[in-house]
Image (cartoon, rainbow, N blue to C red):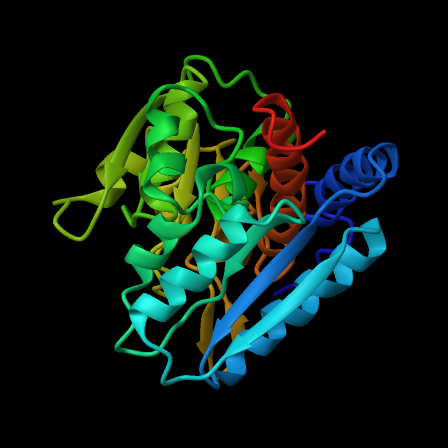
Amino acid sequence: MKDVVNDPRLLRGAPVRARILGEAADYVAAHPGIGKLVSISIGDIPEVAVYIRNQAKVADQLGLPFDQAFWDGDVTQDECKARIQAMNDDPEVLGVILQRPVPDHINVRSLQSAIHPLKDVEGMNPASIGNIIYNDVALAPCTAAAAVELVRETGLTLEGLEVVMVGHSEIVGKPVAMMLMAEGATVTVCHHMTRSVAMHSRRADVVVVAVGRAHLIGPDMIKPGAVVIDIGINQTEAGVVGDVDTDGVRELAGWVTPVPGGVGPVTVAILMRNATVAHARQKAAGWIM
C-alpha cells in the first residue's frame, strides 16, 4: 500500500474501537461484580490461540473477568452441550464464546444453538441472528456489527442509502444486510451466482465486501465518493490483503477501510459491548441483581 498515513479517505478501526471500549469500560466500572466471559476451545487448534489472547487482553483492560476453557479434541457433542448448559445455568457466567474452528466431529451450529441467547455475546445463536429481522440488532454477530459501525462512522445518514453487500455468509453477509435494512438502507446482496457484481456495486453509496478473494473489488466497480467496507482477509505472497484493491479504490472512494486496521480492530470491541448488553438484558430478565 502507498504512503497513506494521513489519507482522510482511509476509514480506520482504531478510533471506533477506542470509543466502544471506553463505553464498555464505563459500564463495567459501574457494575462491580459483573460476571465472567468464558472462552471455549475444543481440540488443539493453534490459530485459535491468537483470538483468545486478544480477547483476554481486551477484557483485562476493561476489568471484565475472562476464563479460558480448553476441552480435549475427543470430547463428544453431547458432553459439549452438557457443559454449555451448565454455563447457561451458572449465574457467575456472563457470556460464552465458542472459538472456531472446532474438530470435524463437532457440529458447531448445534453448539451455538445451545448457548442461551442472553449469554450469546458473539451473536451466533440462531435466535440472536433471527432477532435482527425484527430490528433487534443489539446482540448481532461481531464482525457484521463492526462493519455496520464503520458505516455509521462516516456520518452519513443510513436511511435511504443504496448498499451492496458482496457475500452472503450466515455470519457476515446476511447479518450485515439485515442490520442495514433495519437502519432504513436499501440493500442488494450479491454472491457467486450474481451475473455482474459490478453492475450493482457501481451504483451503490456503500459497498461491503466479505468473500475471501484478494482484490476482487477494484476502482472500476465503485461509484465516486462511495463508502467501501472491506471485511476480507487474504494471505498472499505480498502479505495480508483484503477483498478490495485499497490503493486503487481509495483514489475514487469517499471512505475505504484498510486491511489490516479496518474492521478487525472493531470486532473485539463489539464483543465487549455485546457483553455489557448481555448483562443489561440478564438484569432486566431478573437473572441477576
Q: Position of residue 80 (x, y in %)?
A: 39, 67
Residue at 29% from the left image edge and 56% from the top image edge? 110
Q: Quadrant of the C terminus?
A: top right
On screen, residue 272 versus residue 244, left or right, reads right
Q: Is residue 135 visible?
A: yes
Q: Is residue 16 above or below residue 50?
A: above
Q: Is residue 35 above or below residue 45?
A: above
Residue at 59% from the left image edge and 37% from the top image edge? 150
Residue at 61% from the left image edge and 74% from the top image edge? 50
Image quadrant assignment for residue 258: bottom right
Image quadrant assignment for residue 198: top left
Taking depth in this image into account, of 81 and 131 the one nearest to the observer is 81
Q: Quadrant of the N terminus?
A: bottom right
Taking depth in this image into account, of 34 and 197 the one nearest to the observer is 34
Q: Position of residue 224 (x, y in %)?
A: 47, 33
Q: Is residue 156 above or below residue 198?
A: above
